[in-house]
Structure formats: structure tokens, C-alpha cells
Image (cartoon, rainbow, N blue to C red):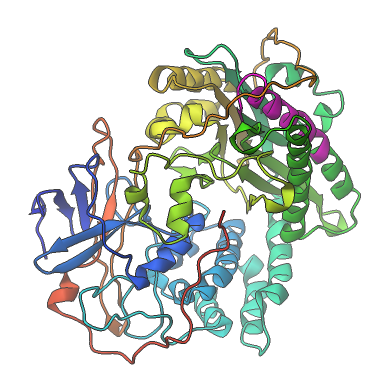
């Protein structure tokens, strides 16, 4: 076991057991000739990086090849976040059910790649607020090691699946946790866990009952939201191709449709592509059209006698966005725009949905985030900042196709080039990311264009005013201006837009949204003729993230296996900022586990369908 302050390969410094510091984060990492097969599930599952780590790189040591992971469930000091079974006993019923819901939603994508066992190792399940996070990936059950352990062995320990688990195994694990579950929900969860044991049980048959239980718990306490957006041209541009909603002028119309039905339940940020006569038109057209589409959808949902399932809501939101996409696409076709000449826009949209519960039990609340391009959504509390979206750019595409590790492909000159945008192609060819979240704590939802998010400035700066915003000591308007100022001073290369949603579930909440001063904004332009302007193609690639969470300990299970060690990389070296990376346990090479049966190779992971 390496001791703290030990230097590894002239680059990494050991901070604690299994936590290393990359002292040269700006330097390129060694590139393997081919990604080992057993690490491909990390690649294919990268669109789920909110829950799952990603591979940082490989490090060759005298003891063997070490796998380094980032985006792992660690706290800032390099400690593991609490395990799910540890946190259950003190969590409220809503959070408990939300954790179970996330496990159920993760089962199918992990099972397709033969790594559903990752959800069956209790010590592998970590929680950050309401979010479920995995420490690493496992291919099977029994005495096997996590993916990546023993890469130097002649026979890979993972070639597809080992003892492939099923939903009955998940149900059995849930039953072991029932003594720690709140009595209010215990009977319902026991029934669900027992249904998992039945032949023919599936996610489709289990999800409706669990969703009904989840929605019923969201009504108390109710979620209250205040929203405000600002946009700025930036120091180096004459025209603003960004558009967002709601602006201060929209708040003045909060009693007039459609704003009366949308504020504060809908927030939008669009970053146009194609110049003043292209991107500016596309982003503003998208905002105006989406307001009408979502207004119609919300009105329709309110008329339903029963709550719509999350899948149906996500389908409807995606359909609304595709309608808007096609409006922009038709404008491109009319103007004869082809390829990089087509005007387009990114999109990040948040929709707070309330659905009536049966027997007059109030309204449920859910948050849906729709995303295309590289505008982003962040959920920020006093304790953490979670990025909810994954960019649609070349770097992320290469990772999910298994063609390179993220830090490796960031070195490509086109790493930041967009692969998805509204209007760039027809709706049937558009891939949309739509996710549902349940909010059970006070926090701020931040939507922004890349004029702010580039170079990791949100991750570096999120905790500066969050307490003041939540207490009401600082208005949303003041905070939004602060984010704009930060973007203009630190990035300054682009237009910037920010929308903040202050979300409250706690009984007491400091202050109310201050009256926003009226701003004289230019009237939105009417589309007449559109000049052919080159699309800004290669976007500036992101540098090392300001706060890189990481970890990849190998676990010792009860009765056999290996204990967690932590190997953490503190501070990625971005202007002294702190990041974390975890690596594979080195003890493996000195004390390898007993041989296991050869894995089943009849199935091999198939690349994610999220291809461009």
C-alpha cells in the first residue's frame, strides 16, 4: 500500500489510500492502443455520468496497470459519500423512495451491458442528497472484482457477464433494507420487492406502482419556485445570439397568458448558432415557440383525470421540442441553407410539472430537464453542485462510442464541436436528452449557456452566494448579474445567458423575490429574410474541470472480497482549485483473488444508441 505523499510515475501524488493527485493536469495522458474491453461499459454508460464514474486514464506502475476514475462519489476532503444503506435510516420517506426509483431506472441500461450487479453491492451505492451514485462498475456476483482490476492478467476477468443477476436479486436486496425504511412506505416497498421475485416481473410492471408512491409523497411539503433570467452580449460581440426565459419583462406579464401559466414553472436557455441573422433568429424563435408548445402541454396535463407516467411526459416534451426543431429546420430549407450554413440553437429547458393526486390529496411535483447541445443545467445546494446534463459535442460522442477516454479526446481540435442542435437536422434525426428529477430539499437550479459554463467556472464558483440566495439575503436578480459578470470577466469570448430557479421545500424560507426593475429590451425581431452566415463550428474545448470528483476503490464484501481503499487525486491544478480522482486498489496485484469461472462471452457490450 502506498503511503501519503508518495510520487507515482513522476506525475501522481498519493493523498490517501486510493486517492491520488494529478500534479500535471494540463499534460496529456498516456493513450492505450485500444481501450480494454472490460472498461467499455464505462464508456457506453457515459450519458449517465450523473450516476456513474468515467475513466480518467491508465497508469503503468511496477505493481501493474492502475485504472483511474473521476466523477466518483467523494466529498471534497476525499472521503466517500455515505452509502445508501447507511443513509436510509435517517432519510425522509420521499428521499428513500426516490433512491429506490433511481435504482429501478438504472437497472435496464446497466443490465444491457452486463453490469447490473453494480446495483447489488451495497457498499457500491453512494448518495449525495437525493442523488444515487455508483462507486464503480461490477460485472457479476460472488468473488469477482470491479471492472478494471487485473488488466495485466493473461486472461481478462471480464468478457461480458459472470453470474448475471436478475430483478429477483434486486428485490432480495431491497427486502434486507426494509427495517430501515419509514413505516409510512414500508408495506408498499415490501410488496414491490416481493413482486420482483415473481416470474415475468419487469421494470414496466413495477415502475407504475413505485411512481405512484413517489408522486404521492411529493405533495407534502409542496415545492415553491421563483425564477429569473438574464442575458448579456458579452465584451467581445455586437449581437446577442442567446435567448432565455423568463426575463424581467416577462415577470411583468406574469398575469397575462402565456406567462401566467408558465412562470415560474418553465425556464429556457438557448444559444444560437449562425450569426446575427441566423443564431439570433433561431434562439429567439425557439424560445417563443417552446413557450406556446409547453403551455399547450401543461394545459392538457391539467385536464387529465390520472397522473401521466414519466415516460409519457418525457415523450410529450420531446415531441414539443421536435416541433420547434422542425420550425427552424423549415426556415433553413426555405433559405437554402445546407450543412454548416444552417442556423440552429442549443437548448436547456426546465419544466416544473404539477399533477393532481387522487382523492384530493393535493398536487404532485416533478422537474423535467430537456437538453440539446452544450448549454447546461446545474442543481446547487449549500453542500454540492451537480451537473444534470451531458454535452452533445464530439468529445462526449467519442467517449460513448468507446473510441477514447474523455481526457484523451479533449485533446482533439474539434472536441467541443456540437453534434446536436435544434434546427441543424430534421426532428426524426434529433436525439434529445430528457430527464426527470424529484426535488426534496432547498436549492437553486441554474441553466446557462456555454458563455458561463466553459472552463468549469460554475463548478469553481457555485458556493459563493448559494446560502445568501436560499436565505433571501440576495435576490435572484443580483445573483444572476454576478454570474454574468463572472462569465464576462473569466471567459468573455461569447454571449452569456443565465436563468436561476430558487426552489423551496422547507417550511421556512427567507425573503421573497424582490421586484425586478423593468429593463428596456429591444423588440424580438420578426423573421423576414435570412442572410447566409457561416456557422461557428469548432467550439473551444473544455479544460480540466474545476472540481473533478472521483474514486474507484475495489470493495471487500462481507464474507469474502476486498475492503474499500481510497486513492484520491486532490486538485487538478486549475489555478489551485481542487479536484479528485480515484484509482484501482494496488493490493490486487500483490494479493490477487482466487480464480473464478470464466465469464460468458456469448454477449458483448454494444455501443450506446446515442450515436450521431
Task: Give the camera-side residue of 440 and 410.
Answer: 410
Question: Does residue 512 show up?
Answer: no
Question: Is 296 placed left or right of 513 in the picture?
Answer: right
Which residue is drawn at the image coordinates 70% and 73% (left, top)? 204
**Main secondary structure found in the magenta portion:** helix
Q: Quadrant of the N terminus?
A: bottom left
Task: Please state which of residues 261 and 453 is positioned toward the viewer in this rendering.
Answer: 453
* Residue 274 belongs to magenta span: yes
Specify the farthest residue to the bottom. Answer: 597
Q: Using residue 221 as the reference point, say whether residue 418 is left or right of it.
A: left
Q: Is residue 302 above or below residue 267?
A: below
- Residue 335, magenta (yes or no): no
In the rendered view, tell whether residue 23 sits above or below residue 71: above
Q: Nearer the viewer, residue 12 or 285?
A: 285
Whether residue 548 is visible to the viewer of this picture, yes or no, is yes
Q: Is residue 90 above or below residue 159?
A: above
Q: Residue at x 21, y 64 (%)?
A: 66
- Image location of residue 387, percent across then percent down: 49, 44
Tell me residue 259's x, y (percent): 80, 27
Q: Quadrant of residue 79?
A: bottom left
Q: How many marks?
A: 0
List x then y, in percent, for residue 519: 68, 9
Q: Which residues are magenta?
A: 272-293
The answer to whether 565 appears left or right of 479 in the picture is left
Q: Position of residue 459 (x, y in %)?
A: 41, 36
Amino acid at each position: 500500500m502506498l503511503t501519503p505523499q508518495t510520487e507515482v510515475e513522476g506525475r501522481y501524488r498519493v493523498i490517501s489510500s486510493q486517492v491520488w493527485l494529478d500534479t500535471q493536469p494540463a499534460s496529456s495522458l498516456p493513450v492505450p492502443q485500444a481501450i480494454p474491453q472490460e472498461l467499455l461499459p464505462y464508456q457506453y454508460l457515459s450519458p449517465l455520468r450523473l450516476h456513474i464514474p468515467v475513466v480518467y486514464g491508465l497508469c503503468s506502475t511496477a505493481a501493474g496497470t492502475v485504472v483511474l476514475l473521476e466523477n466518483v462519489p467523494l466529498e471534497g476532503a476525499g472521503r466517500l459519500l455515505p452509502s445508501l444503506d447507511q443513509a436510509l435510516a435517517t432519510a425522509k420517506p420521499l428521499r428513500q423512495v426516490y433512491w429506490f426509483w433511481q435504482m429501478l431506472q438504472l437497472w435496464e441500461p446497466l443490465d444491457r451491458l452486463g453490469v447490473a450487479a453494480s446495483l447489488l453491492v451495497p457498499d457500491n451505492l453512494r448518495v449525495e442528497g437525493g442523488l444515487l451514485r455508483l462507486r464503480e462498475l461490477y460485472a457479476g456476483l460472488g468473488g469477482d472484482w470491479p471492472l478494471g482490476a487485473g488488466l495485466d492478467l493473461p486472461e481478462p476477468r471480464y468478457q461480458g457477464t459472470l453470474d448475471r443477476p436478475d430483478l429477483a436479486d434486486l428485490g432480495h436486496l431491497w427486502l434486507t433494507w426494509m427495517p430501515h425504511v419509514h413505516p409510512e412506505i414500508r408495506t408498499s416497498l415490501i410488496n414491490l420487492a416481493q413482486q420482483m421475485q415473481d416470474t415475468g416481473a419487469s421494470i414496466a410492471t413495477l415502475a407504475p406502482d413505485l411512481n405512484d408512491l413517489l408522486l404521492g409523497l411529493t405533495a407534502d411539503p409542496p415545492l415553491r419556485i421563483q425564477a429569473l433570467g438574464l442575458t448579456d452580449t458579452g465584451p467581445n460581440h455586437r449581437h446577442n445570439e442567446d435567448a432565455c426565459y423568463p426575463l424581467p419583462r416577462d415577470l411583468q406579464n406574469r398575469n397575462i397568458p402565456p406567462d401566467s401559466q408558465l412562470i415560474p414553472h418553465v425556464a429556457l436557455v438557448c444559444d444560437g448558432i449562425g450569426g446575427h441573422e441566423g443564431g439570433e433568429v433561431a434562439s429567439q424563435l425557439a424560445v417563443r415557440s417552446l413557450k406556446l408548445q409547453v403551455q399547450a402541454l401543461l394545459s392538457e396535463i391539467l385536464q387529465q383525470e390520472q397522473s401521466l407516467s414519466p415516460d409519457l411526459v418525457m415523450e410529450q416534451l420531446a415531441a414539443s421540442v421536435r416541433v420547434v426543431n422542425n420550425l427552424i429546420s423549415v426556415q433553413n430549407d426555405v433559405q437554402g441553407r445546407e450543412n454548416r450554413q444552417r442556423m440552429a440553437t442549443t437548448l436547456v429547458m426546465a419544466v416544473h410539472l404539477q399533477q393532481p393526486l387522487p382523492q384530493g390529496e393535493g398536487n404532485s411535483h416533478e422537474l423535467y430537464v430537456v437538453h440539446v447541445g452544450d448549454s447546461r443545467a446545474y442543481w446547487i445546494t449549500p453542500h454540492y453542485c451537480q451537473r444534470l446534463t451531458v454535452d452533445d459535442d464530439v468529445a462526449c460522442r467519442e467517449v460513448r462510442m468507446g473510441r477514447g477516454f474523455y481526457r484523451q479526446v479533449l485533446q482533439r481540435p474539434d472536441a467541443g464541436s456540437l453534434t446536436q442542435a435544434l434546427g441543424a437536422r430534421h426532428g426524426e434525426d434529433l436525439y434529445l436528452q430528457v430527464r426527470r428529477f424529484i426535488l426534496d430539499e432547498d436549492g437553486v437550479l441554474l441553466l446557462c449557456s456555454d458563455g458561463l459554463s466553459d472552463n468549469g467556472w460554475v463548478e469553481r464558483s457555485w458556493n459563493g452566494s448559494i446560502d445568501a440566495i436560499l436565505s433571501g439575503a440576495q435576490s435572484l436578480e443580483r445573483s444572476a448579474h454576478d454570474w454574468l459578470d463572472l462569465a464576462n470577466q473569466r471567459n468573455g469570448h461569447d454571449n452569456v445567458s443565465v436563468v436561476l430557479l430558487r426552489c423551496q421545500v422547507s417550511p421556512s424560507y427567507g425573503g421573497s423575490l424582490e421586484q425586478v426593475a423593468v429593463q428596456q429590451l429591444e423588440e424580438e425581431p420578426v423573421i423576414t429574410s435570412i442572410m447566409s452566415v457561416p456557422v461557428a463550428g469548432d467550439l473551444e474545448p473544455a479544460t480540466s474541470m474545476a472540481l473533478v470528483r472521483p474514486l474507484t476503490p475495489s470493495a471487500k464484501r462481507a464474507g469474502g472480497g476486498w475492503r474499500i481503499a481510497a486513492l484520491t487525486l486532490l486538485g487538478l491544478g486549475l489555478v489551485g482549485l481542487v479536484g479528485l480522482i480515484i484509482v484501482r486498489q494496488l493490493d490486487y496485484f500483490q494479493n490477487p483473488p482466487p480464480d473464478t469461472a470464466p465469464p460468458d462471452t456469448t454477449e458483448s457490450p454494444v455501443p450506446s444508441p446515442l450515436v450521431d
